[in-house]
Image (cartoon, grey):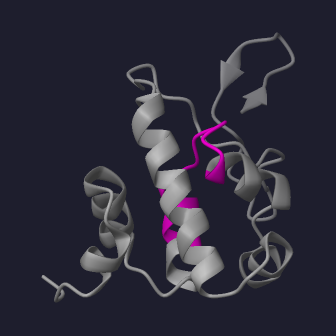
Amino acid sequence: MYTAPDDRACAAPADVNHQLTTREAPKSKHREPIDPVVRLAVGKKLREARKAKKLSIRKLHDLTGVACTSISRAERGRSGILIETAALLASNLDIPLWKLVRAALTDDLDKTMHQPEI
């Protein structure tokens, strides 16, 4: 956001070379925290899928660009991840995101992985 000289906040100038200086996603006022049990279950399934592909956290980082610490914290359920990040990780593990989430909620990755696409 561009701050005018008189400290009024206004839209950024329409400059074609203008780039945002932050990589943070906009915060929603209506964002509810993810249930820690669900966060832990999804992280557990991410780890199972990564290990099944015989990938280290470092190798998954190399494939996706997602920080090793972010992958580790997500796998341990210590922090949530953006849906886009979860989709990127799942894609690189050859799992559709919906199957990963369903497996986490039903606690059966092997059975879910062999279900046909919708």
The picture quadrant where one finds residue 32 is top left
Residue 64 coordinates in the image, percent (x, y): 71, 77
Residue 75 coordinates in the image, percent (x, y): 63, 53
Vertical relation: 33 (above or below) 105: above
Residue 115 appears left or right of 96: left
Vertical relation: 64 (above or below) 1: below
Vertical relation: 39 (above or below) 34: below
Residue 8 coordinates in the image, percent (x, y): 72, 13
Nearest the eye: 83 or 57? 57
Residue 87 appears left or right of 58: left
Vertical relation: 118 (above or below) 25: below
Span of residues in magenta: 75-89
Residue 54 coordinates in the image, percent (x, y): 69, 87
- Res 18 visible: yes
Nearest the eye: 39 or 6? 39
21 in the magenta segment: no
Point 31% across, 82% down: residue? 113
The picture quadrant where one finds residue 9 is top right
Nearest the eye: 29 or 15? 29
Residue 111 appears left or right of 29: left
84 in the magenta segment: yes
